[in-house]
Image (cartoon, rainbow, N blue to C red):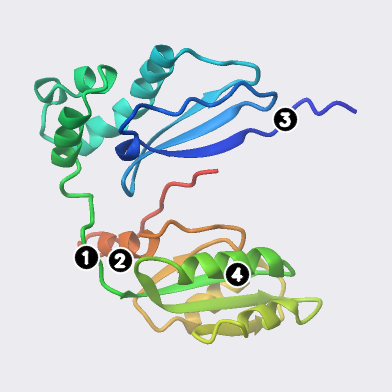
Amino acid sequence: MVNKFPSYIIQHIQLDSCQNGLALPLINENGYYLVFWWKQVPLGQLYIERGVEPASDLLRNDIYGAIKPAVEAYSSEKELTSLGFKEAFLAHEERGLFKIMNKVLLNYLTPSVPASVGISVVICTRNRAVSLQRCLISLMGQKCIPAEIIVVDNAPIDETTKEVVEKFTSVVYYREPRLGLDIARNRGAKQASHPVVAYVDDDVIVHPYWSLRIWESFIDKNVAAMTGLVIA
């Protein structure tokens, strides 16, 4: 049986590291899902359909179109036209582009971060030990880790989740016998010891600055809740 929906190859491209131009994807039978970053800031995404091998200039124009809305949003009161962003990007003027992007993203680039921040991360899970372990590894590998990580094991059929959590000495484990995601989330919130509670799915790999950005969002006392970007 032929798969009508072949998987895409996912590539994360650091535009700040493309000193010698973009490394073009090779033609393939799957297609590409490209995610563009400037240092730790996500800028946009682009799909390249299966069997397509775009020319260099065409791909760069497509990338410009993909990242332009985000760069405009980050630029705030700065006028991109006066900064020459489009011209610098399309003409491969790396020095000018670095100057522009560092100015535009001045308030979003993080030169130094604390070792940890006072948030409680809650993971509700059920019989998905392999995914959970990968998620916990990513949480512990952040540039800035959360002060508390809670795993709520929701009506498990075995001890595999508990065994995974025991590998991480700083992670707290709770078994919730009543089946239901809402019940598990409420249990996690009840057990949390920090005023900011962040939920993450057990099959997620978090960004290195995920906890920091959550904590930063609540510095503003008018913020009651937030959500974030999910990238394949």
Residue carrying label 1? 219
Q: Are marks 4 and 3 in contact (CB under 8 Å)?
A: no
**For the point 54% across and 84% down, which residue is it?**
172
Residue 80 located left or right of residue 197:
left
Task: Specify which label sits upstream in the sequence, 4 or 1.
Answer: 4
The answer to the question of whether label 2 and label 1 lie on touching residues, with beta carbons closer than 8 A, is yes
Q: Residue at x 71, y 81 (%)?
A: 177
Left or right placement of residue 96 versus residue 62 in this view: left
Q: Residues within 10 Å of mark 4 (few under 14, many from 20)?
A: many
Q: How many numbered dots are placed on residues in this image?
A: 4
The residue to which callout 3 is attached is 6
Residue 63, image x and y in percent? 39, 24
For residue 216, above or below residue 26? below
In the image, what residue type sits under mark 3? Pro
Among the 4 quarters of the image, the one containing residue 52: top right
Tell me whether the residue at label 2 lies in contact with that at label 4, contact meaning CB atoms closer than 8 angstroms: no
Q: Amino acid at mark 1?
A: Ile
- Tags 2 and 3 in contact by the CB under 8 Å rule? no
Residue closer to the observer: 187 or 209? 209
Q: Secondary structure at mark 4?
A: strand
Q: Residues within 10 Å of mark 3 (few under 14, many from 20)?
A: few
